Every structure is written in structure tokens, then in C-alpha cells.
Image (spheres, grey):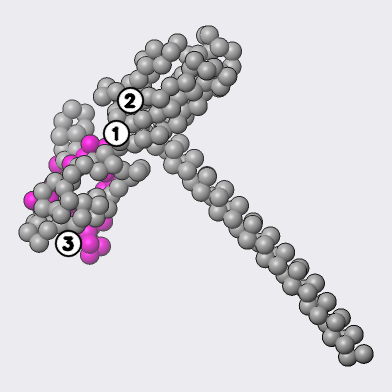
Amino acid sequence: MSRHVLTTANSKAYVFMIRLLGRTSLFVLLMGLTVVATQCAEAQGAEADYMMHAGDELEVSVWKEVDLQRKILVRPDGKFSFPLTGEVQAAGRSPAEVRADIESRLKVYIPEPVVTVTVTGVNGNGIYVIGQVNKPGAFVMNPRLSVLQALSVAGGTTPFAKLDNIVVIRMSGGTQRSLPFRYNKVSEGKDLSENIELEAGDVVVVP
């Protein structure tokens, strides 16, 4: 009798564990799918928001058109050439905007063209950090950096750096502007507005 009761109890416990593991596995699976979906949405959002620059690398393809698939490097003038469309402006535009432009031009030759524009390299989205930092040089932003983040990427400042005299030199409309960055005030949270988001081509100078 006791053996029968024990066997029944074990069977119930086994069934309970199976159900529990099933629910746990389902929960883990759903959580995994949620994370993947979130990451994909974030990646798509980042690409949709990204504005291309000279030096960026792209892949442009037209569905079912083998001869209309190209790996492209955006030229210094911000443009690239593509069959049947001529010169296409890339710099300052998102991949979605370039895709729509190419599709519009191809409609003359191909009914309802489906174009894909993918950014495969963001070398054109670069900034420079020079002066009293441990690792001065050019750095690629992927996709954005603030001044503090740029200083961190450059290995931090040296003991000789004049932290309250840091400037960001920015080219805008053919003229250069100097934007102040006072490290001590920013690090103390007193003037966070100076911790600006850098743009491609910016030069951070640490005297």
C-alpha cells in the first residue's frame, strides 16, 4: 500500500515537474523572442535615423535584377553612381530616403522596383580627438558620441590637460565654429549643455 502511495506521489511530482519545465521553457522562449524583436526594432530604428556621410560603405540592390547590385563607397562629394539612375546624393540623407530616390528614378525602366539600401560601413561618420589625451586620433562614431564619450574613447586626458579650455571645432556652412567644453563643470553636472553630441568631422581639441 505504502509503495503504491509512493509511486503515485512520484508520478504526480514527475507530471508537475514536466509542466513546470514546459512553462519555464515557454517563458524563456517568449523572453528570447521579445529580446530579439526589440534588438531588431532598435537596429532598424538606428538605421532609419542614421544620416550618411562621405566615406560610408553601402550595399544597394534591386530585387530580381542581378545586374543592379552594387557595393558602394560614398565619394567625398557625398554622392555615388548607380546604373540607370546616374548620380545619387547620399550624404545628409537616411538609407530610406536614398532607397525612395532610387526607386523613383528606376520606375522609368522597371515597373514597381524594390530597392534595398544597407549601410555596411560608417567610416565617414568620424571625429578627431587631438592634444592632451592618451590616444589621440580619428574615431568612428557608431552612430553617435558626446564630447565626454569621445574623450573616453581617446583614452582620457593626460595630467597636463587644461580641462576647462577644451573646445570642439566644427565646420558648418563653409565656416568653422569653436564650441567650448569645460570638463570640470560638466563632470560636476553644472553645465551639461556643453556635453554636445558630436557630428561627423568635428575636432575635439584638448590643450
Mark 1 in CB contact with mark 3 (< 8 angstroms): no
Nearest the eye: 167 or 55: 55
The disc label shown at residue 184, or none: 3
Q: Mark 1 vs mark 3: which is more N-terminal?
A: 1
Number of numbered labels in the structure image: 3
The disc label shown at residue 47, or none: none
Q: Mark 1 vs mark 2: which is more N-terminal?
A: 2
Q: Which residues are magenta?
A: 178-207
Give x and y (percent) for residue 139: 25, 43
Q: Mark 3 vs mark 2: which is more N-terminal?
A: 2
Q: At 36% from the left edge and 30% from the top edge, which residue is drawn? A: 57
Q: At 81% from the left edge and 80% from the top edge, which residue is drawn? A: 10
**Residue type for callout 2:** Val
Q: Residue furthest top?
A: 109
State left or right for residue 50 relative to residue 200.
right
Give x and y (percent) for residue 60: 45, 24
Q: Residues within 10 Å of mark 3 (few under 14, many from 20)?
A: few
- Disc 1 versus disc 2: distance between alpha carbons? 8 Å
Comparing marks 1 and 3, which lies closer to the viewer?
Answer: 1
Q: At 43% from the left edge and 13% from the top edge, which residue is drawn? A: 83
**Residue type for callout 1:** Gly
Q: Quadrant of the N terminus?
A: bottom right
Give x and y (percent) for residue 66: 52, 18
Q: Is residue 116 above or below residue 17?
A: above
- Disc 3 versus disc 2: distance between alpha carbons? 39 Å
Q: Which residue is mark 2?
A: 74
Mark 1 in CB contact with mark 2 (< 8 angstroms): yes
Q: Which residue is mark 1?
A: 124
**Residue type for callout 3:** Asn
Give x and y (percent) for residue 162: 9, 56
Q: Is residue 179 visible?
A: no
